[in-house]
Amino acid sequence: MLSSTWNFLKRHRRKFIFAGVFVGGVYLLGKYAQRKIQELQEREAAEYIAQARRQYHFESNQRTCNMTVLSMLPTLREAIVLRLNSESLTALLKSKPANKIEIWEDLKIISFTRSVVAVYSTCMLVVLLRVQLNIIGGYLYLDSSVGKNGTTPLASPDVQQQYLSSIQHLLGDGLCELITVVKRAVQDVLGGVSLKQVLSLQDLEEELSEVRRRVEQGHKALSWYMMPDEENALAAQACGLTEHDVTTIKLLNETRDMLESPDFSTVLDTCLSRAFSRFLDNVAEFFRAPEGDSGPSDTPGSLSHVSLPLAKIIPIVNGQIHSICSEIPSHFVQDLLMVEQVKDFAANVYETFSSPQELQK
């Protein structure tokens, strides 16, 4: 029996060797495939966790953006009111001065100027902070990621403070220049309009559109009011620079590139259109058909037939700054914070600065 079995194995040894090699190969291949599948699953799980973590960080960052905007609006409002103080003029009018008409003319220019400036600067604050906080948020995400391995952080607390303090340009020199440009445009457009001239909402919209045209087609791009131009920034860098200074300058240059991009211009223009529309909606609440008018005074169409003397429109416009620059979320501010293009642009900025591959490009 053993002899016949041995002879059988000798005769078919090639087949047995081949079968053994085949079975062993299949087993090893199976183990290899199992290990690769496990590695793939672990990698996909890690990528999913990282993506979920980054999404959570992004959404948290957007809430921080909204809170920061609301917290800075009172400062912006105070800066505008300080430079365009209409309250002193209204106090003078109550004393019935001899030059009442002259004071009314000054009040007309200041009232429209400060409301228009409030609309522009609030929109700029919203979009500028979206850019800055998503750039710094992207760097902070990279700093907190596991892959940093204790290397020098991209955004240390000192760098963050230096970088974010650049918002002071919008509240300082940028705001002063914006006031000068808007005031000149308001004077050109409304300076010759009589206080007794009656204006409908459509007339008011046309006047504001002309003011916008003059401001936005001026010799300075709107981005200049948000950040100083590069020549001034380079002049300030002439002294010895620390490592933190170099990093801050890099962040500022990246921000400037963002502000000068076509996408940013589109987003800012969308915000401005939404903001001026909301501003007119707020003013429209004071346009009502006279009592006893048989027309449906509460319907939107009926307001086109209602006109007010410019002298009555001035106090309405003058008071709008408290709605525009309100730290309590109003329809005006909420509209800007919820603009879809702003959200998409913020996501693109964050994606760029929280992805090592994109950042290297």
Image: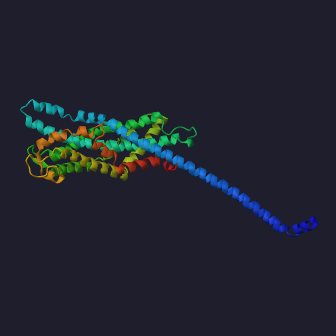
Query: Who is closer to the viewer here, 217 or 303?
Result: 303
Pinpoint residue 260: horizontal percent, then vertical percent: 36, 49
Judged from this view, the residue extending furthest toward the bottom is: 11
Q: To which quarter of the image does residue 22 belong?
A: bottom right
**Residue at image coords 85%, 67%:** 13
Pinpoint residue 316: horizontal percent, then vertical percent: 17, 41
Q: Is residue 218 left or right of residue 130?
A: left
Query: Who is closer to the viewer here, 117 or 52?
Result: 52
**Residue at image coords 55%, 49%:** 47
Q: Quadrant of the N terminus?
A: bottom right
Pinpoint residue 257: horizontal percent, then vertical percent: 40, 47
Q: How is the image coloured?
A: rainbow
Judged from this view, the residue extending furthest toward the left is: 98
Q: Is residue 9 above or below residue 316?
A: below
Q: Is residue 82 left or right of residue 191?
A: right
Work out whether residue 241 can be spotted.
no
Judged from this view, the residue extending furthest toward the front is: 1
Pinpoint residue 53: horizontal percent, then vertical percent: 50, 44
**Residue at image coords 36%, 43%:** 128
Judged from this view, the residue extending furthest toward the top is: 95
Q: Is residue 262 left or right of residue 56?
A: left
